[in-house]
Image (tube, rainbow, N blue to C red):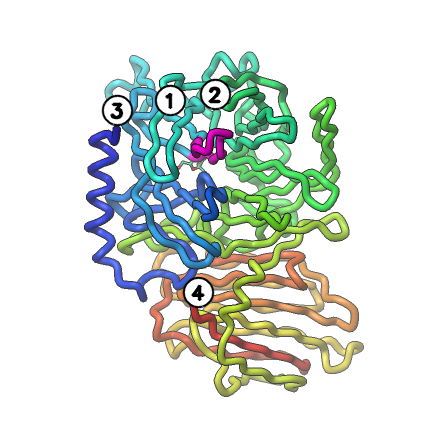
Amino acid sequence: MISQTLQEAREYEAAAERNILEDERPSFHLSPRTGWMNDPNGFCLYKGRYHLFYQYYPYAAKWGSMHWGHAVSNDLLHWEYLPAALAPDMEYDQDGCFSGNALELPDGRMMLVYTGVRKEYSEDDLEDKVGKEVQTQCLAVGDGIDFEKSSLNPVLDEKDIPAGCSRNDFRDPKPWRCEDGSYRCVVGNRDADGSGQILLYKSDDAWHWHLQKILAQNHDRFGKMWECPDFFPLDGKQVLLTSPQDMLPKGFEYHNGNGTLCLIGSFDPVTEEFREESDQAIDYGIDFYAPQTILMPDGRRVMIGWMQNWDTCVLGARRKWQGQMSVPRELSIKNGRLYQAPLRELSAFRANKTEYRDVLLEGEKDLPDINGRVLDMEIVIRPEDPDTLYQKFSVHFAKNDQYHTTISYRPQENVLKIDRKFSGSRRAFIHQRRSKVPAGPGGVLKLRLILDRYSVEVFVNDGEQVMTAIFYTPLEAKDITFAAAGRLFMDVVKYDLIL
Ligand code: FRU
């Protein structure tokens, strides 16, 4: 039975999407059918198709009472919208169906595991109606289009969290099926001191869950609350991804506000103990948060994140839609670090190759046929003379007389910077971010830029780091120019992406 709240959302989105022209959206990055999108949810492969749900408020391009939007794809690059999957229509989720994930049950049905939010009002806040969110974990089961919320809901609530821990910050379940047929689920939570932690739950049937242990604890090292955990083996290691709130900066590794964190370590399947070995940011740009991963049939681990950040949502506030997903990224671990590469199938949509080798760059230059807003461009730079380093390299894109966005590199400081302050934004918030990027042997720096109308994802040195940023620069701004202070050699290979 579809509730009236969900039915209304479905009717609304089907009508409202007609107001958004194809060109007003990214070409192959998923955007909301209408209104607002944040985190990816329920990312899974189900009966031969990839499903991606998302945090969704259809009625305005701003965060509101959370629904789950829904899209499907055969290749993770071409998406088709399906009707909204969940609406806040039960007492336990009346203030929002927050982030979660999906499982395929042994009987072939799809199970959504999500956070139900209900606000509680104390005497004090009855007047201003602020309230406190009570967060619980809930189930909905269906055929991949329509879902019925379980009568067991909520299946995890305050009884299932360690003593003294927060019932207000208890969210974003990520369940998976183990080889022996039992299930595990990680959920973000706060301990009694307010610092983030990841709880591990177990179930034998996916319906009845109990606390297994505290899997990881923040101890105030990386922000406060840890949101949207994901936990999986990769290249002989175990990876915990999470998105911390309230970060403090640490060198160029972490920045203030909402950030992303990758903990790499080992996992003992008997004691279910996770031992951390190293930490790093997942993305070093401005707009990336709350990623989810899937395991592809061929063994690749692929991640999609929300290509925005809570601290920068003011950008795009006046659009018909707001929020985009990142390009699907293949993950691997090399030399103890998380590497990312755009889904390799994207290369099949490369067209109109334009290539320049050994261009001597000094001052500013444009190169014939290097322009566009939906493209894949590889740039390799090296000093003309490794003993006399150049001072700075820049590439400007989404550019015309009025606008541009820039990636620049200062080899003497090993700093790569993204700067979108000339992208048309009229608000004073974060427009730049820097990352420490040592050049490779011979001073070589490799950049691969994926542009899709309103975003850039820069894969640095074969994916050792990624910097992501969105910009809503008018589409007429599509020039690309290169500049050097000092002298360097540059190779450029550019393809249009036609999907
Ligand atoms: C992360 C997050 C989640 C929550 C959702 C609400 O971006 O804050 O923790 O489930 O967004 O929309």
Give above or below for 193 relative to 486: above
Identify the residue position indicated by label 1 in the image: 150
- Residue 413: x and y in percent read 69, 64
Picture quarter with ligand 1: top left
Q: Are marks 1 and 2 in contact (CB under 8 Å)?
A: yes
Q: Quadrant of the C terminus?
A: bottom left
Circle 1/circle 3 CB separation < 8 Å: no
Residue 99 x %, y % = 43, 35
Separation of marks 1 and 3 at Cα, in angstroms: 33 Å
Q: Which residues are magenta?
A: 99-112
The numbered dot on residue 207 is: 2
Q: Which residue is mark 4?
A: 452
Residue 98 belongs to magenta span: no
Looking at the picture, tell me which residue is in the foreground, 439 or 349. Answer: 349
Q: Secondary structure at mark 1?
A: loop
Alpha-carbon span between mark 1 and mark 4: 39 Å
Ligand 1 within 8 angstroms of badge 2 C-beta: no
